[in-house]
Image: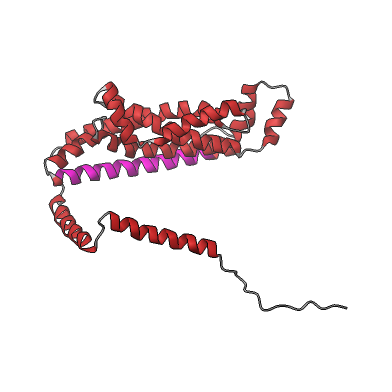
Amino acid sequence: MSVAVRSGPRRAFEPDWLARIGWLAALLYVVYAASLLDFTWARFVTGLEQAARFFDRMFPPDFSRWEAVLKGLKESLEIAVLASVGGILLSLPIGFLAARNLMPAWVNWPARAVIALCRTFHPVIVAIIFVKAVGFGALAGILALVIASVGFIAKLFAEAIEEISLKQVEAVRATGASFMNVIVFGVLPQVSARFIGFSTYQFDSNVRNSTMVGIVGAGGIGAPLFVAFQRFDYDVVCAILIAIVAVVFLCEILSNQVKRVFGEAVQDGREPRRG
């Protein structure tokens, strides 16, 4: 009877030298990048002093121009709502076409290329392009945020569809249902709750992005904010920022309520509560 001889004690967790080398390389690159970008401690301290003077000039906030602030916030909300609706309506068919478990490769690859193209540029860059194309105003902001919405929602829609159970889809197909009926009765019930979550999140994102695109002339509260910065009216800037934060918080609460009510209704198979 042979007895195996152990060469020595084994460690419970073997060191991963490849991962360690990777972390060391990342750390060295961070140090290298910081040296190229003139990131010094003295500059950081100077920035803190300037920031202290800046915040000192922001308080107390000046709400004397509340009418212009309310007008800008109203326009930003309108831009966010219209861009969200347009983005969701475009993202639904693109998301279905990009799902690899429903469509052949010659269909989903062009759809995924469209999604990748929409995700390539920041909404501010897209807004600048549309400002040059259609002029200053809310239309440029709406079009820019529609592109951004398609890039985000369509990708998540496609990924959610690819994670569904195909048993329910095959069961609907076995009844002789058409392709649209397969989508409505076999696919949508499995992903509706996630679709609602993605859509509400994108609406929150569009509310925030509507402020940024306004800075480049695409409408919304961003224009008054940029003008206040140019005039060094930092107390007005503070008032506008407080108003933006309040609106974002309210939209967040509203989105959570909508997601909870309609998400529960979809999962339970009943109609959403009203009233």
Q: Residue shown at 39%/29% (left/top)?
A: 146
Total count of labels: 0
Where residue 40 sits, quadrant-wise, is: bottom left
Apparent side of residue 267 relative to residue 84 in the rendered image (left or right): right
Apparent side of residue 260 relative to residue 36 in the rendered image (left or right): right
Q: Position of residue 189 (x, y in %)?
A: 60, 33
Q: Is residue 183 visible?
A: yes
Q: Which residues are magenta?
A: 235-263
- The quadrant of the image that shows the C terminus is top left
Viewer-side residue, 113 vs 72: 113
Q: Position of residue 109 (x, y in %)?
A: 55, 30
Queried whether the magenta region covers residue 261, the answer comes back as yes
Q: Residue shown at 38%/43% (left/top)?
A: 252
Queried whether the magenta region covers residue 189, the answer comes back as no
Where residue 206 sits, quadrant-wise, is: top left
Q: Position of residue 147 (x, y in %)?
A: 40, 30
Q: Position of residue 251 (x, y in %)?
A: 36, 40
Q: Is residue 78 visible?
A: no
Give the colour scheme of this rendering: secondary structure
Where residue 210 sits, quadrant-wise, is: top left
Tell me which secondary structure the magenta stretch mostly adopts. helix
